[in-house]
C-alpha cells in the first residue's frame, strides 16, 4: 500500500516555522526514534524552526534522551504544523487531545502501517514497503538533501533496528540497509546502541523461561498466554510481557502469537508469521496491522482457541496457494 509522496511532506515541513510531532500509545523504538530523529533533523537543518515533541516514552529505551513538552498553548498550536509518525487513528495517538482541538494549521502523517486514519491530514505519506517509519524518516532526509547529524542518526537507527527485528524481518530491503549505512556514516556509536538495545536482565530471562516452558501448540500455530497474576509473579506488566517473537521461527510453526491480559476483560493479542497473512485474522477480531505482524484486543480468553484455529485456517490458505 502506497499513498502520497515524500515531496509534499518535505515541502510542508519546510513551509512551517512551528512544528509539533506526535507518537503512538504503547511507545516503541520506531515511533520514538522517528519522532526524535525528525526533530533533530529539522533543528539541524532549520535552526530557526521551533520543534516540539509531545507524548510520553513510558520509560522505555531510557539510555536515549526523550524529552517532551506537553504544555503547548492554543496560540502555539494555531501557528503549527502537526506531524504524526508511525500511527494512524487518533485513539492510538498519545496526546490526541491536542489534535482534537482542531487548531493546527495543517496535519501530516508519515507511516508504514497500511491503515486508514481519522486525522484529516493535508498530506499523508503511507508506504508499507518500509520496514519502519524511521526508515521513511531516513529516506526523507536523503531525498531532501538534509544534513544528518549524529544525534538524529542515533534515534533513526534505533527505530529501524528495532522495527526490523535487527534487520531480520522479511520487509527488510536493500533500501533499509543502504539507509542504515548512511546513518553509520555519521559515526554513531553503533556498539553502544547495540549493547543497550540488546540488554537483558535476570527478571527478563526468568520471564522468558516462563514462556518457553508454558507455550502451547496447535498444528502450525504456537502461542502463549499470560494473565495479570502471572505477570505480577514475574514482576512484569502487560507491555513487557507481550513478546510474541520469543516463539518465532520454531520448526513448522509458521504462525506465533501472544495473549496478554491487560485488564480484567481486556486481552492483547499479537500475531506474527513467516508466511501466512495473519492480518486477516487480526481484522476479523477487530484489530489490524501488517500482513505478517498484527494485533487485536479481545475481551474473553475463551476466544483464544478460536483465534488459534482461525490462524491455522489462514495457514492452510497460504500453504495451498
Ligand atoms: Mn513502526
Image (cartoon, rainbow, N blue to C red):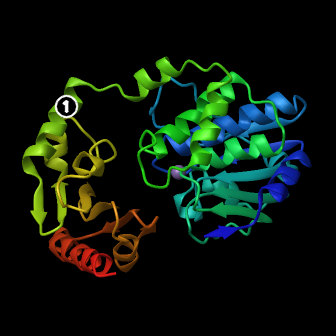
Residue 319 position, x and y percent, is 28, 76
Asked if 246 appears above or below 199 in the picture, the reply is below
Asked if 177 appears above or below 131 in the picture, the reply is above
Residue 28 position, x and y percent, is 48, 43
Q: How dense is the environment of label 1, judged by Cα within 10 Å: few (below 14), some, or many (20 and up)? A: few
Q: Is residue 153 left or right of residue 316?
A: right
Inspect this view and state whether residue 27 appears: no
Residue 165 position, x and y percent, is 41, 43
Q: Is residue 281 left or right of residue 137?
A: left
Residue 112 position, x and y percent, is 59, 58
The residue carrying mark 1 is 205
Residue drawn at (56%, 67%), measured in percent from left and top?
114
Q: Quadrant of the C terminus?
A: bottom left
Q: Secondary structure at mark 1?
A: helix
Residue drawn at (64%, 41%), measured in percent from left and top?
35
Residue drawn at (60%, 70%), measured in percent from left and top?
1
Classify residue 246 by image quadrant: top left
Q: Is residue 245 left or right of residue 86?
A: left
Residue drawn at (43%, 38%), measured in percent from left and top?
166
Q: Nearer the viewer, residue 321 or 268?
A: 321
Amino acid at each position: 500500500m502506497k499513498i502520497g509522496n515524500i515531496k509534499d511532506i518535505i515541502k510542508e515541513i519546510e513551509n512551517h516555522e512551528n512544528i509539533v510531532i506526535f507518537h503512538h500509545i504503547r511507545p516503541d523504538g520506531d515511533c520514538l526514534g522517528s519522532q526524535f530523529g525528525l526533530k533533530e533533523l529539522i533543528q539541524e537543518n532549520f535552526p530557526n524552526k521551533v520543534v516540539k515533541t509531545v507524548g510520553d516514552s513510558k520509560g522505555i529505551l531510557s539510555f536515549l534522551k526523550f524529552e517532551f513538552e506537553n504544555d503547548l498553548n492554543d496560540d502555539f498550536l494555531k501557528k503549527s504544523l502537526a506531524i504524526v509518525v508511525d500511527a494512524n487513528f487518533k485513539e492510538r495517538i498519545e496526546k490526541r487531545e491536542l489534535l482534537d482541538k482542531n487548531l493546527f494549521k495543517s496535519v501530516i502523517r508519515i507511516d508504514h502501517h497500511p491503515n486508514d486514519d481519522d486525522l484529516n491530514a493535508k498530506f499523508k505519506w503511507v508506504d508499507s514497503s518500509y520496514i519502519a517509519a524511521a526508515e521513511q524518516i531516513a529516506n526523507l532526509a536523503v531525498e531532501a538533501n538534509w544534513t544528518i547529524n549524529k544525534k538524529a542518526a542515533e534515534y533513526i537507527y534505533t527505530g529501524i533496528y528495532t522495527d526490523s527485528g535487527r534487520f531480520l524481518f522479511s520487509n527488510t530491503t536493500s533500501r533499509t540497509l543502504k539507509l542504515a549505512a548512511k546513518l553509520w556514516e555519521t559515526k554513531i556509536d553503533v556498539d553502544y546502541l547495540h549493547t543497550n538495545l540488546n540488554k537483558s536482565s535476570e527478571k527478563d530471562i526468568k520471564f522468558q523461561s516462563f514462556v518457553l516452558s508454558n507455550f502451547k501448540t496447535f498444528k502450525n500455530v504456537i502461542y502463549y498466554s499470560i494473565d495479570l497474576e502471572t505477570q505480577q509473579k514475574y514482576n512484569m506488566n502487560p507491555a513487557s510481557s507481550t513478546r510474541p517473537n520469543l516463539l518465532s521461527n520454531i520448526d513448522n510453526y509458521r504462525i506465533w502469537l501472544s495473549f496478554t491480559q491487560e485488564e480484567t476483560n481486556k486481552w492483547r493479542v499479537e500475531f506474527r508469521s513467516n508466511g501466512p497473512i495473519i492480518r486477516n485474522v487480526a481484522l476479523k477480531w477487530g484489530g489490524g496491522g501488517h500482513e505478517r505482524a498484527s494485533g487485536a484486543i479481545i475481551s474473553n480468553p475463551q476466544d483464544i482457541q478460536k483465534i488459534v484455529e482461525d490462524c491455522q485456517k489462514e495457514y492452510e490458505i497460504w500453504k495451498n496457494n
